[in-house]
């Protein structure tokens, strides 16, 4: 009986740690038409290896992205055309940052860190829905791909590698 208890306790602990081990966004909701500070929380490496790169894909409707540099990391952005044009402060935007890459750093598995960017959320994003930011975390020859997006009605906790996201709120 004791063996069963310890085995169940270990399984519960592993399941709980897996749920806490995802890359997440610190602020998990934001109003459409507002400025959003995205803080990606990286709680661990890949299978015990140090994180050496973090890449985040910027979803459509997230515009005017400005990432925060990190000492010891190389920061790059990939730009491209938006699917449509957006108005921001009286200006028409048709292209912008589509991906942010921090690389060349060294975040050991036993440490935690955050990767930050600022952006504007388009006013026509669908209120009440989740907006997902797929992330790839690289660790030398290993990687964690936090890119799964739940199907309609599916709980993201049911996914092994869910993409971090925010719930879109009405404009204030």
Image: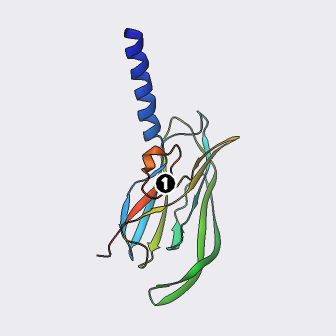
Q: Nearer the viewer, residue 32 or 26?
A: 32
Looking at the image, residue 68 sits to the left or right of residue 125; the answer is: right
Residue 106 x, y percent position in the rendering: 61, 44
Q: How many marks?
A: 1
Residue designated by label 1: 150
Q: Nearer the viewer, residue 165 or 107?
A: 165
Residue 102 x, y percent position in the rendering: 60, 56
Residue 110 x, y percent position in the rendering: 51, 34
Residue 66 x, y percent position in the rendering: 52, 69
Which residue shows up at 38% across the image and 74% down it? Answer: 34
Taking the view exactly as shown, the residue that stands out farthest to the right is 141
Q: Residues within 10 Å of mark 1 (few under 14, many from 20)?
A: some
Taking the view exactly as shown, the residue that stands out farthest to the bottom is 90
Q: Quadrant of residue 109?
A: top right
Coloring applied to the structure: rainbow
> Which image quadrant: the C terminus?
bottom left
Taking the view exactly as shown, the residue that stands out farthest to the front is 153
Q: Quadrant of residue 31?
A: bottom left
Which residue shows up at 41% across the image and 68% down it? Answer: 36
When the figure is inspected, residue 161 is found, relative to residue 3, above or below; the finding is below
> Which image quadrant: the N terminus?
top left
When the figure is inspected, residue 85 is found, relative to residue 39, above or below; the finding is below
When the figure is inspected, residue 85 is found, relative to residue 115, above or below; the finding is below
């Amino acid at each position: 009986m004791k063996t069963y208890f310890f085995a169940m306790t270990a399984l519960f602990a592993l399941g709980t740690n897996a749920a806490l081990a995802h890359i997440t966004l610190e602020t998990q909701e934001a109003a459409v038409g507002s400025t959003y500070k995205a803080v990606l929380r990286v709680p661990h490496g890949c299978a015990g290896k140090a994180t050496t790169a973090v890449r985040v894909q910027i979803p459509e409707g997230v515009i005017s992205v400005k990432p925060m540099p990190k000492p010891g990391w190389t920061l790059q952005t990939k730009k491209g055309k938006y699917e449509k044009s957006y108005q921001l402060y009286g200006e028409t935007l048709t292209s912008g940052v589509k991906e942010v890459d921090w690389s060349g750093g060294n975040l050991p598995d036993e440490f935690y860190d955050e990767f930050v960017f600022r952006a504007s959320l388009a006013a026509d994003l669908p209120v009440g829905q989740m907006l997902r930011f797929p992330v790839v975390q690289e660790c030398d020859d290993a990687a964690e791909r936090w890119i799964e997006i739940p199907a309609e009605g599916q709980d993201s906790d049911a996914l092994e590698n869910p993409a971090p996201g925010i719930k879109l709120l009405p404009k204030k």
